[in-house]
Image: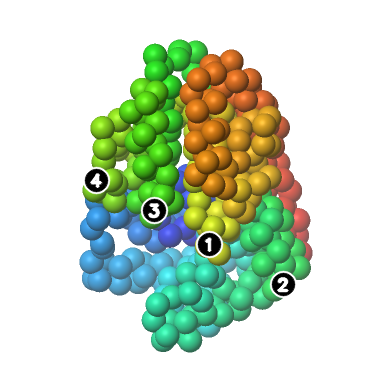
Amino acid sequence: MRVLAFTRYDRDAASTRYRLLQFLPELEKAGIEVEWHPLLGHGHMKRLVDGRSGTGSGVAAAYARRLATLATARKPDLLWIYGELFPYLPAAFEQAAMPKGAPVIYDWDDAFHLAYQGHRKATVRGLLGEKFDRLLKGATAVTCGNEMLREHAARFCERTLVVPTVVDTEQWRPSVSLAERPIIGWIGSPTTWPNMRPLLPLLKRLHRETGARVRAVGAGTAAEADRFEGLDLVEWSEDSEIAAVRSMSIGIMPLLDRPFERGKSGFKLIQYMACGLPVMASPVGVNNSIVEDGRNGFLASSDQQWETGLRRLIADPALRRQFGEQGRKRAVTDYSLASQAPRLVSLFREVARR
């Protein structure tokens, strides 16, 4: 079987690595050959983290390359598309550019449709507000990072299933060493850093009163103005990503309770749990099903709940260890590459036979 796969970003984006690239060896073992084409080249994510945007000419050239790939590629057995082929272009354009007759699987791990439907410009809302609905109507199947996304996709495509964003739990493992003082950790990107800001006054106070440090990985320049004594801003890199999470004592995922955030797939929590960390999270979207409150972590919907939960975890190494062990078990069972790759292989085979 031959699959043409398309992502927006190169491997420096977490979505590309964890929604596509990590599955390639298992797909290859099953006789599924994947030819992968990112839209934007390596380094684009780094520019975004540094607060720089791409040039218009560079984006235009990327679109031209993707058009050429679609026009010249031998017809595949399957198209595998993360999100969309051409951001900010209409659905009709995308559908016209696709190889005719090839079944299409779309992959969603965010509420992509809300970016257009809630855009500040009325022209974008008018032209693209229904783009994803139209794309999904033409899909053979849709894989979704959580149940909320699946419910939306199922309105337009009958064959939908939840495939959570997972990690290889053979690589993402607990650390054998413990930090002298607890480290409250967060991993993300500049675009998700605003979810941390309401919690920063509490974290600053907890550092002052308990000595616990705060470690933020991947926030980039977006977090520079928020820096305080006790907040370590760590640059993300693929090579050091696992070690950065393993260096933490507690993993947190605060979320603003807004439509787009409700569509998040809880990947931070899965990374933390795979490394044996206790977690704390806002009870927003899929966080409610990943965090088993009082078993592998705490859910917190108010400042008081965040403070109570974090103080307990900071003060009680045994509780951190207990929650971490339960989270690790859950990650291996439900959120591991080994648990999800066979489901993707099965879907590809079934879709390609249609």
- Asked whether disc 3 touches disc 4, contact meaning CB atoms under 8 Å apart, the reply is no
Q: Residue 272: x and y, percent?
A: 53, 32
Query: Which kind of residue does numbered mark 2 sit on?
Result: Arg
N-terminal of the two: label 1 or label 3?
3
Q: CA distance from mark 3 to mark 4?
A: 12 Å
Mark nearer the viewer, 1 or 2: 1
Tag 2 near tag 3, CB within 8 Å: no
10 Å neighbourhood of mark 1: few (<14), some, or many (≥20)?
Answer: few
Residue 306: give x, y in percent of width and height: 52, 39
Determine the secondary structure under disc 3: helix
Which residue type does callout 1 highlight? Arg
* Disc 1 to disc 3, C-alpha distance: 12 Å
Q: Is residue 288 visible?
A: yes
Q: Earlier in the sequence, mark 2 or mark 3?
A: 2
First in sequence: mark 2 vs mark 4:
2
The tag earlier along the polypeptide, 3 or 4, is 3
The spot of residue 219 in percent (x, y) is: 34, 45
Q: Nearer the viewer, residue 318 or 44?
A: 318
Q: Which mark is residue 155?
A: 2
Residue picked out by circle 1? 258
At x 47%, y 82%, the residue is: 125
- How packed mark 2 is, by other alpha carbons closer than 10 Å (few <14, some 14-19, many 20 or more), is few
**Residue 80 x, y percent position in the rendering:** 57, 59
For badge 3, the amino acid type reads: Pro
Position above or below: 281 against 312: below
Q: What label does residue 224 carry, if any?
A: 4
Locate residue 113 relative to residue 160 in the image: left or right: left
CA–CA distance in space, label 2 to label 4: 42 Å
Numbered label tally: 4
